[in-house]
Image: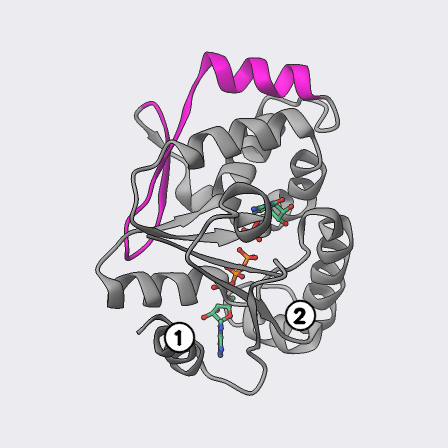
């Protein structure tokens, strides 16, 4: 069984996926972390983020591994854990450029499709491109202001700056962010975290 939870930036995908996965007793898979890892490593190596060959060579030489757990995903490059470095504003700013590269998308998709079922997969194109055969599909939205207010609780920037960055990322991610036609779209604005998780769990039972 595969459940997909897609949505716009900071709509609650990873928090909701973790809650749903824990209730189901399965892991969740955060596809965005692989795009973030490719971006972080590209930045650290001072590579041109618009150019796939350099990034792919780097990722080939030093493979990245996603560890999907129900409570939270971890990302490794050999013995080095990258997880804590993946949510900086610097990575946020670069990641959509890297995610627009077809070769990087293939690199991510191959890793995701190799994972053993069951799991909950979250991202942008889980229900459309990567797992079109998933048994249940959901898509999370909320206004940019609400998402920015939520994110401001975990970042040092102020709400307007976060809101502008989220809107920019949504725009750059438009191509891969369309909801699957068979996904249930949930506006998380009026709901708390548990409310969103319960809405999804109700559909799964
Ligand atoms: N329904 C909700 N009510 C209140 N806070 C929420 C809700 N959903 C998510 N949050 C909070 O919003 C923030 C962003 O959530 P989360 O990181 O899960 O989003 P995301 O879609 O995975 O983000 P990103 O796209 O950047 O990876 C977190 O602080 C989370 O606790
Ligand atoms: N399926 C996906 C998942 C992510 N992306 C790109 O990665 C960025 C970070 O993802 P988050 O889920 O952590 O926000 C996102 O902005 C996209 O550029 C993607 O393209 N497809």
Seen in the picture, residue 67 relative to 10 is either above or below; the reply is above
The CB of the residue at mark 2 lies under 8 Å from ligand 1: no
User: Residue at 50% across / 67% down in the picture?
Assistant: 12
Q: Is 110 colored magenta in this rendering? A: no
User: Residues under labels 2 and 1: Cα distance?
Assistant: 36 Å
**The residue tagged with tag 2: helix, strand or loop?**
loop
| Residue highlighted by disc 1 | 203
| Furthest-bottom residue in this view | 190
Percent across and percent down for residue 161 are: 73, 65
The quadrant of the image that shows the C terminus is: bottom left
User: Residue at 64% across / 60% down in the picture?
Assistant: 179
Percent across and percent down for residue 22 are: 26, 63
Q: In the shown orientation, is residue 30 left or right of residue 7?
A: left
Please tell me which residue lies in front, 91 or 188: 188
Seen in the picture, residue 127 relative to 112 is either above or below; the reply is below
Please tell me which residue lies in front, 76 or 176: 176
User: Residue at 72% across / 23% down in the picture?
Assistant: 48
Quarter where residue 26 is shown: bottom left
Percent across and percent down for residue 108 are: 52, 33
Q: Residues within 10 Å of mark 1 (few under 14, many from 20)?
A: few
Stretch of the chain drawn in magenta? 52-78
| Residue highlighted by disc 2 | 158
Query: Which one is in front in this view, the residue at disc 2 or the one at disc 1?
Result: 1
**The residue tagged with tag 1: helix, strand or loop?**
helix
| Furthest-left residue in this view | 25
Q: Is 74 colored magenta in this rendering? A: yes
User: Residue at 62% across / 60% down in the picture?
Assistant: 9
Whether residue 23 appears in this view of the structure is yes
């Amino acid at each position: 069984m595969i459940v997909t939870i897609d949505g716009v930036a900071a709509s609650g995908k990873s928090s909701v996926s973790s809650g749903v996965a824990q209730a189901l007793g399965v892991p969740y898979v955060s596809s965005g972390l692989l795009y973030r890892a490719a971006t972080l490593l590209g930045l650290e190596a001072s590579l041109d983020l618009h150019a796939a060959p350099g990034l792919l060579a780097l990722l080939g030489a030093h493979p990245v591994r996603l560890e999907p757990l129900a409570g939270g995903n971890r990302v490794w490059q050999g013995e080095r854990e990258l997880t804590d470095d993946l949510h900086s504003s610097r990575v946020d700013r670069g990641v959509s450029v890297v995610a627009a590269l077809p070769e990087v998308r293939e690199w991510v998709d191959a890793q995701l499709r190799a994972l053993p079922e069951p799991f909950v997969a979250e991202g942008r194109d889980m229900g459309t491109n990567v797992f079109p055969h998933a048994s249940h599909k959901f898509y999370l939205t909320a206004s940019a202001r609400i998402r920015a207010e939520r994110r401001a609780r975990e970042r040092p920037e102020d709400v307007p700056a976060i809101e502008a960055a989220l809107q920019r990322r949504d725009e750059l991610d438009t191509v891969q962010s369309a909801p699957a036609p068979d996904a249930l779209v949930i506006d998380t604005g009026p709901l708390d975290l548990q409310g969103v998780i319960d809405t999804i769990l109700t559909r799964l039972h």
